[in-house]
Image (cartoon, rainbow, N blue to C red):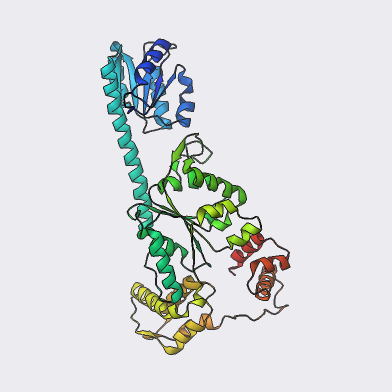
Amino acid sequence: METQTLGKILIIDDNEDLLFAAKMLLKKHAKEVMIEKDPRRIPFLINNNSFDVILLDMNFREDTTSGKEGFYWLNQIKEIDPKAVVILITAFGDVEMAVQALKEGATDFILKPWQNEKLIATLHAAVKLKESYNEVDKLQKKQKALETDLKKPYTDIIGSSASMKNIFSIIDKVAQTDANVLILGENGTGKELIARAIHERSLRKNETFVGVDMGAITETLFESELFGHKKGAFTDAKEDRAGRFEVADQGTLFLDEIGNLSMPLQSKLLTVLQKREVTRIGTNKPLPVDIRLICATNMPVHEMVMENTFRQDLLYRINTVEIFLPPLRDRHDDIPTLANHFLKQYGQKYRKNFSGFTPSAMELLQRYPWPGNIRELQHAIERAIIMAEGDQLDSRDFFFLSSKPTSEKAPVNATLNLDDMERSTIQRAIDKNGGNISKAAKELGLTRASLYRRLEKYGL
């Protein structure tokens, strides 16, 4: 059996004898040969299939000599797929028109009646051209993603506490594998930093790292963002677009805040993870993807499984290895190291020289509970550096922290603003239940999802 090296070929001609002869010849050399005598079906065929080469007749029955139909359908093909490789089928007397068609985007032309060897050689050259188009397109997408990625600040993970040493050990073990990783922890604990560290130490480190904030994607845009779409698939689809899965092919895909997904979206994500292929909106053509998956969430997904708000089979799929990032309040030993790191970073940024922190300032930083974790510490030091006047940061430079109440209850009648009252009530319920979201939601008469939305709204 001959090697099928020509991929998928579409032949469009209103001469059924020619179509049959071409298919019989090429099926030995191509993975698939589709034939079509009605050119009006071209848009449907191209939107729902991916062809390596398209053979298009220049003249059809409505106009057998001018080549106008051939030009029209060539333009239609190139509008749908600008990188389509089109070879024209033409009679000897149409060569001048064929040359004109080359200027309008055709790749080559063959004369009727053709020589079999010449036809196959022409198709081999066209397939190589298509492969080069695909490679360039893939490289451009990866380059764009890498450029975006490089703009994001990345510093290595900082910490020497026992809990962080344990996390370093897990990263070293899991990075060299393709195991799916689930990172758990509160907002601001550095979950994306851990994901990047795994990628940078993996066998995929020279490929793309693609991060997606699942909490920021609406239900209507979910499939388009993750799986991509074809031009014209919906109102705002102005051009073909690769989804995040495609862009991350051969690299790492980081799905942040995965706990925010609704059950229907969880089902769609699970299907893609099981099949390892995506289908762009507007097509029926599945595309295989090879990714290393890392997910993260600040939500208690194990409790959510018990409450039927998170799919158990999806959880099994994403947490081959689980990493828990402790909150900063449980990492007191790391606070001085982190604080000095941010002092140096922002001192350079704002061209200010500081020798360090006064004892009172460091005592304050280690005593403060840091509800916003490392992110809050980072912003606090940046703000203090901007406002400070001495050569050391003092506790007075962090007045905005020391003035914050910790666990005092807000006066019941301090305000009649509904948002303030709701925020205060939610805070009291959480304090009363020791931070247990399930118990607090039950006492408030809310679902867990509703309570999480309010926590996000009020920054609690």
Q: Is residue 51 left or right of residue 330?
A: left
Up-down relation of residue 66 to residue 73 (above or below): above
Locate residue 361: give its quadrant: bottom left
Locate residue 340: give its quadrant: bottom left
User: How far across and how far down the image is residue 92, in percent?
Assistant: 28, 12
Q: Residue at x 35, y 21 (%)?
A: 28
The N terminus - image quarter? top left
> Can residue 434 be seen by looking at this rendering?
yes
Q: Is residue 92 left or right of residue 55?
A: left
Up-down relation of residue 400 to residue 266 (above or below): below
The C terminus - image quarter? bottom right
**Looking at the image, which is closer to me, 392 or 6?**
6
Up-down relation of residue 171 to residue 389 (above or below): above
User: How far across and how far down the image is residue 52, in percent?
Assistant: 36, 30
Q: Residue at x 63, y 72 (%)?
A: 435
**Looking at the image, which is closer to me, 27 or 417?**
27
Q: Residue at x 58, y 60 (%)?
A: 301
Q: Residue at x 57, y 50 (%)?
A: 266
User: How far across and how far down the image is residue 243, in percent?
Assistant: 46, 45
User: How far across and how far down the image is residue 295, in percent?
Assistant: 49, 57
> Can residue 219 be seen by looking at this rendering?
no
